[in-house]
Amino acid sequence: MAKSDQKIQHMWSLICERAVVDSTSNNVSLTNVLEEVQIVPSPEIEFGVGEKDKKLIVIPMVFNLVSTVKKLTASEYNGEFQISVVDPDDKVLQVNANAFKIPAYNTRFRTIASIQGFPVTVPGEYKFLIKAKENTQKEFTKLGEVLFEVKIALPVASKPK
């Protein structure tokens, strides 16, 4: 879809541990915005060295991906929102999609995707690709992305007694 054909525009997205929407004002409070996670190696969490040894590990964490888009037309928008998790080697690990509707009288739309468990294959920079499509379209269009760093933490050495 050409830029001039776009009916929605990505404003912002971020990852946080918790997003709370005030029922009176509709404002959102974001708690513990996440930019990276550090994994402490253990027998259960071990990364493979080569492509064939690469393992998919799911980090047991719960977080929210919060996104806001702006509607660029006066008419109602009916579509689908898609979030893909992509590893540092550009391998798509997970894809989630949900239908959404922006009424004619609204100009913005906020979505809060609750994600349980984060899939990881190697340390490095992961991407949450945010895409959307109108119900009349076949293909999703990229709206934006959020980067998320996965690091290996060094184990803390215990002190001799």
Image (cartoon, rainbow, N blue to C red):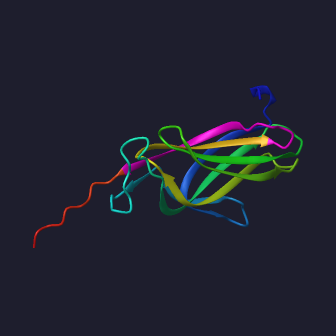
Question: Which residues are the magenta region?
Answer: 134-151
Left/right of residue 68 with respect to residue 134 in the rendered view: left
Image: 154 above or below 62: above
Q: Is residue 142 magenta?
A: yes
Left/right of residue 135 with respect to residue 28 in the rendered view: right
- Where, quadrant-wise, is the C terminus in this rendering? bottom left
Which residue is found at the position 48% from the left and 53% from the top?
56
The quarter of the picture where residue 107 lies is: top right
The picture places residue 124, in percent across and down from the top left corner, at 42, 43
The picture places residue 30, in percent across and down from the top left corner, at 57, 58
Front residue of 127/8: it is 127
Image: 61 above or below 88: below
Front residue of 58/32: it is 58
Front residue of 46/99: it is 46
The quarter of the picture where residue 86 lies is: top right
Q: Does the magenta stretch mainly form a helix, a strand or a loop?
A: strand
Q: Is residue 58 magenta?
A: no
Which residue is found at the position 33% from the left and 58% from the top?
41
Q: How many tags in the picture? A: 0
Which residue is found at the position 18% from the left and 66% from the top?
158
Which residue is found at the position 83% from the left and 37% from the top?
137
Left/right of residue 89 with respect to residue 114 in the rendered view: left
The picture places residue 22, in percent across and down from the top left corner, at 68, 65
The picture places residue 59, in percent across and down from the top left corner, at 47, 60
Residue reaching furthest to the left: 161
Residue reaching furthest to the bottom: 161
- Where, quadrant-wise, is the N terminus in this rendering? top right
